[in-house]
Image: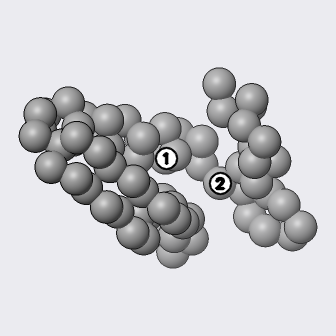
């Protein structure tokens, strides 16, 4: 499914940047999905941007807006 994203080439390394972990990206999406499912009072959530922390080798949400 990730392969269908226009930005997929970033996962494989782009313009000399390191490749990104598809598994870690899937993990952050699932974790946010779980957060929504476990908290019925959340009506909207906007996460933007999500960045790759090359030191910790994980994705990090830099900004998140949650509407309850």
49 relative to 45, above or below: below
Classed neighbour count for the residue bearing mark 2: other residues with Cα under 10 Å, few (<14), some (14–19), many (≥20) = many
For the residue pair 35 and 26, the one nearer the viewer reads as 35
Q: Residue furthest right?
A: 15
The residue located at (11%, 33%) in the rendering is 40
Q: How many marks?
A: 2
**Residue 27 appears left or right of 15:** left
The answer to whether residue 53 shows anywhere in this view is yes
15 relative to 67, above or below: below
Disc assigned to residue 20:
2
- Residue under circle 1? 24
At numbered mark 1, what does the secondary structure look like: helix, strand or loop?
helix
The residue located at (81%, 48%) in the rendering is 9
**Residue 29 appears left or right of 21:** left
At numbered mark 2, what does the secondary structure look like: helix, strand or loop?
loop
Classed neighbour count for the residue bearing mark 1: other residues with Cα under 10 Å, few (<14), some (14–19), many (≥20) = some
The answer to whether residue 58 shows anywhere in this view is no
Where, by quadrant of the figure, is residue 60 drawn? bottom left
Whether tag 1 and tag 2 are in contact, CB under 8 A, the answer is yes
Query: Residue 64's spot in the image, x, y percent?
Result: 35, 63
Q: CA distance from mark 1 to mark 2?
A: 8 Å
Query: Residue 53's spot in the image, x, y percent?
Result: 51, 70
Quadrant housing the N terminus: top right
Query: Residue 20's spot in the image, x, y percent?
Result: 65, 54
Disc assigned to residue 13:
none
């Amino acid at each position: 499914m990730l392969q269908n994203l226009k930005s997929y080439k970033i996962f494989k390394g782009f313009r000399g940047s390191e490749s990104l972990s598809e598994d870690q990206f899937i993990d952050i999406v699932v974790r946010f999905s779980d957060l929504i499912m476990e908290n019925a009072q959340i009506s909207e959530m906007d996460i933007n941007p999500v960045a790759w922390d090359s030191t910790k080798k994980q994705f990090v949400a830099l900004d998140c807006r949650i509407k309850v």
